[in-house]
Image (cartoon, coloured by chain):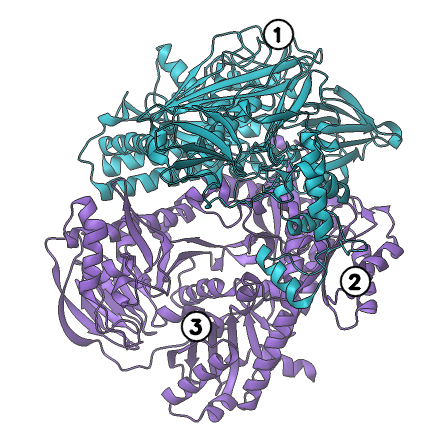
Amino acid sequence: VSASTGAAVLDPVLAQVVRGRLVAITDQMRLALQAVSGSPTVTEASDFFTGLYLPDGAFATMGHQVTFEAPPVGFLIRHLLAGGKQLREGDRIIGNDPFVGALHQNDLQMCAPLFVDGVLVAWAGVMAHETDMGGMDFASWSPKAKEIWQEGLRIPAVKLVDAGELREDVLDMILTATRLPAQVGLDVRAFIATLNVAADRLVELCHRYGTEVVQSVMAHMVDDSEQKVRTRMRAMPDGVVHTRDYLEHDGHTNELYTVDLVATKTGDSLTLDFSGSSPQAPGFVNCSRAGLSGGVAGALIPTLGFGIPWNDGLLNPVRIVAPDGLICTAVAPAPVGSATVETVWVVSNVVSAALNRLLSATPEFAHRAQAVSSGTMATFNLSGRNQYGEPFGLHLMDPLAGGFGAFADHDGQDAAGPINTPSPSMADVEVNEQKTPLVYLYRRLAQDTGGAGRRRGGVSAEVALTVSVPETQALVMTHGAEVPNALGMSGGLPGGTVRQLFAEGGIGFRDLGPKPGAFPLRDTDVFAVTWQGGGGLGDPLDRLPDEVLDDIRKGVVSEAAALETYGVVLRAGADVRATGRATGRADVRADDGATGRDTGWDEGATRRRRREVRAGRLGRPVEAVPAESRDLDPSLRPAGLKDGEGWLPLADRLHAIRDVRGDWRVETTDGAVLCVGSTRWREGAEAFPVPLPPRVGGTLHHRLTATGWLCPITGHLLGVDVHMKDQVPFHDLDLDLSEGSRVSTLLMY
Amino acid sequence: VPDTRMQEQAQPADRPGGWVVGTDVGGTFTDLWLRSPDGQSLVCKSPTTPDVVTGVVDALRLAAGLVGMPVEDLSSRVARFGHGTTVGLNALLTGRAARVGLITTAGFGDLLEIGRLRRGTASLQGLEFGDYSLRGRTGPLVPRHDVVEVRERIGSDGRVVTPLDLDSARAAVRRLRDEGITAIAVCLLWATENPAHEIAVAELVREQIPGAFVSVSHVIAPTVGEYARASTTAANAALGPIAGDYLAVLGEQLAALGMHAPIMMTTSAGGVVPAAALSATPVTGLLSGPASCVVAGQALGKQLGRPQVLTLDVGGTSFDVGVVVDGAPLLREDVTFGGADMRVPSVDVASIGAGGGSVAAVSGGILTVGPRSAGATPGPVCYGKGGVEPTATDADLVLGVLDPNRFGSGGIVLDVEAACRAIDERVGGPLGLGTMEAARAIREVLDSAMADLLRSVTIERGHDPREFLVVAGGGSGPSHAWALCRELGLEGFVVPATATAQSAFGAGTSDLRTTASRTCYVRLSGGAQPDESHAALLTRALTDTAHRAITAIPASSATEVTHTAAVRYHGQAHHLDVALDARPDAAALARLLERFEADYETLFGKGAGYREAGFEILSVRAVAVQHSSARSSSTSSQLFEDRGVRPVVFDDPHAPRECTVYGCDWPSADQSVAGPCLIQLPGCVVVVPPGGTAATDSLGTIHVKVGRP
């Protein structure tokens, strides 16, 4: 159904009134769900979704909730429509089948067909992560699983409420299958309450303003968002972006899997081709096609949809290409238990990386280009009997506290949460300790986990845990312990990797690797985990030393990293402990001038050190590189720009330039021409084995390596690729430079 | 003997012969409400001054002039001086509060940095949540380098896991002392269950930093959840020195005028406390302005015999709604302030960015009004202060609701033509509407956003708005209330004569009220019944809170204490406050759970409850109240003055209705007029729609019936 069929003569005032009511109804759904639910994932972490859908299953409104979860309920609705199921007023349908529409079985979803005067006018949908839906192991995601049937109850699409009558037998069946019947029971009630709120209010709205008006407004909302995002896309250059990310360990063996994306952007549409990804795995890391859509939505919605109401319209310009049977389009009997935190998440990483490459090359949006944020969510589940003697289960949401990727114009936020959660939240230490036998030894920011760069990626948080009862069962797994998923941009380094340590009896920490699975956690043991930081943006040598000093004083960057990675030499005896409030850059310098206070860093030594690092990268003597490189200023014309030439930024130190004859070249800020006739700038950059800092590359997967790309004149970092040892890095950005192409309309002179 | 004296101070308003003053300092104006011993009231406004205190004294002088008395004579006759101010609020928002050192448990010094991940999105609204580049704009209340850690640990059951390492505590305190920090917040894990370590650290601070203002978390915010508790404690420490200084200066200046009445400060929980009580816990007064507004509505409801009240306050930038149920304002503990989550007992005021200054804009064929506001500068286009974007006030002017020559009391003449031009250009043109149609569209979109908020605080919480007395206040409340009433199917609304100074009125008339709470965790697994040991635990906690609530205010036999317990189904994040006896037994606890379930179903619908999940009782709260019983009445003899006729657009933009315009400063009792008409009060206009009527009661309050369209 095309949204454009809505009445063309819709009264704009009425439209806004109805639009406001629809948004208010969506918010009421959220409140109802959060108020009634008994799941910490819902009440504390906002890991859920509520929305209103068009009759065809396109979502018209959503709260600011997990973006992965935007498409799945729509799949459930479309499944119902395709199956021709007889639907009645008061029906409430429940499902959680990853091969129908869920991301994994934990995603319990419900939808309600909303009827007015006997006609289906819309749908309401709700979905939330349940800590346990049965299966071979607690938490319904088991590293041991080889088939989806082992992972928990699968509900395709079942009427839980039939024309207003709750089917107690169906509910009993569901609650019998889970290890946490009280929690799931409360949540199912919350779902029903949520859908009832939506049904009551939407029917009222239709009676007040007319069904046609309400339907037309909903269709217009989707249309408007689609038009807005298409307009935005038309302002971006056309071309092909190629990105790739990896995840290690399928639960059985430490195999490395690839998610490969070739994104082709033409005009106002986008094709995302995942055909180059690994075949599906024998373990639980896969995702189904629903998961692939979720992963794409998770990154695309915030990256291109900023400032636009979020609905299905944002996804309409996108076509996804991927054959069945890949790690991101797994088919039965592949297990998909950890899809959300494994392949779905990695799909988001590559989509985010690709779209931000395009933003970088768009003058209007270059300032908001962002490196990859927290490229994984390491999971920690705990079960057993709690301090009150009751059986309990916990899905810890603290691992959301990864670092945010750096933006071109500001640092990534520390412990910001990932990009798939617009309003992230986690429980207080005390709340978790009251509800469960967890005992925290610390919860703090993790030093040196932020990707180094001119703009630093946010650092992650880290926790150390034990328990207050003799014994519990922990279930621990992640990817990204050996893969730095939070890749940098523009020469920025990746964020730190996950580190999972265990001290049995409290003595001697050993590294658990990515997927230790289930193990007992006793009151004498300590489990410590550090999550991924955000990627950095730009060469770390371009970071202002004052900013590095601020980071040291805050404790998020070590003195060793300041020297090794940022090339900042501290003044002997400098007080790096912190004095006074942090202020803006310019102020700090002015203050220092006025008061003569020690900045903490040695200017001459820092300049020398940075030159040495640049020369070292190129493998040349110090004198062979210029003492100074050109300052970075995004508004500054490139040095090599001649009269009549137009240019476009590609990265911190890379510019695409078109000369008066219409020929293109890519030039670094310091004037090195890297390629002509294309944007495949790696052709002329110098490759070198970039050393990754210990927190980033200390436990790199044995099949991976990293290559840095340098300006051949200055030795500044232009890009960093993490890739398989037996594969040559590829060109990530190939803009369409043909005559009359979109890119020529974006040139600056 | 001291007791008697204090008792007199406690309820001086009841003493015959006393004048009562209520003052409220806002960003632009300092409002003052004054009641004479014979019950006659007046309201006046004076510009707020940078030092605040001068503006308060100016307002008092102005009031004295209005009643024809030398200010010293009036001051010496004042029996009660109620006061609310945004001093603390502004200091915190602008970073002018005291520099705070925060002391935490070792391993948790980053708690404000991490901020439960919520700090990153703090202060974002609406579509801003979807723009990730806006995240992280709010810094932590205390920068990381002013946070120090001490080695100690208490478990969730209150047992000492790691004894307090005094050496580490001394080192931590020394570090803050060396920095010259004198406002100290202490927040240690589980201090709510065992405050011993916090008390010891606080003593050490007082020893090593003489004169320090020390806030400890188990006193300031006795609630489980270290992030909000630390934020609240830090905010309190930041405000402490400022509040102390401010109250001292205010006290001196008033005393210099001959005033001997105690200063009663308004609190966020709705009510007043003696100034001395607030200077120790200034954070409890942070949001007192909006709270006083609701309390004013509550007082009006009480005088009119209406226990269910909705207070609507439409100012320049926001629309605030308070709900009074069974005579008491709804309270909440969780508030967000300055980007931080706080736990302060507060009147639950729902708010959206919809007010007179809300900007109307068209994008993609869609008209939106607010949440962006033109604010005071440049303000609406019609103010002629450089505003170019049309606002709700411009629309009201064009529709005929506002009189261009009599807007507010500032003597501003509004520019109707400029307002028309802006509406044409930015709304009418893009939408293909005429000026009037466009102006009406602006009003309709704004009204519907306000109606959505009203629905969400009434219908969505299980209340029928038709049972409520609607009290409209603020500069734009009385002119929009009629449309809201129609939208929600309500009969009408009332406008107090103090409509534009409700917070000052509230400050003058509020009950003396304190709250005290503490954690008290009782867990009942599915199927378990409460027993006498649970009852004993609760009784101990209730006795303690009642004692603390009572001793915080002057002793009086008239003090009433009520108790509530916070109850929820096991696992939920949201609780309900349910009334409880002072000394419950097991049977009383069983009744408590029944009441919880009944309340729960009222809120979330039949069948939403789920006993099988079990229950948790989290905390108890005691509220001690000394009622302010004085009534005011209108002894004004001002009749509505007929100021002519003007066309006003109601429903049909093409058919404006001729409306009689009445004017009055303080209406006398027992008048009535028929709609459509306008009643111009100081600072606002009451709109009575066609088919409606308006009448005044003995207080001078205007009762409007909106009739049927």
Q: Nearer the viewer, residue A532 or A389?
A: A532
Q: Secondary structure at mark 3?
A: helix
Residue B119 appears in view = yes
- Disc 3 to disc 2, how far (Cα)? 39 Å
Visual hue assigned to chain B: purple
Mark 3: amino acid: Phe
Residue linked to disc 1: A147
Q: Is residue A507 left or right of residue B427?
A: right
Residue linked to disc 2: B202
Outermost front residue: A623
Visual hue assigned to chain A: cyan
Indicate the position of residue B390 as horizontal and vertical percent values: 27, 57
Tag 3: Cα neighbours inside 10 Å, few (<14), some, or many (≥20)?
many
Quarter that holds the N terminus of chain A: top left
Circle 2 chain = B
- Disc 2 to disc 1, how far (Cα)? 58 Å
State the image quarter where residue A383 is shown. top right
Give the residue drawn at x 68%, y 69%. Answer: B551
Count of numbered badges drawn on the protein: 3
Give the residue drawn at x 77%, y 35%. Answer: A465
Q: Which mark is residue B505?
A: 3
- Disc 1 to disc 3, how far (Cα)? 70 Å
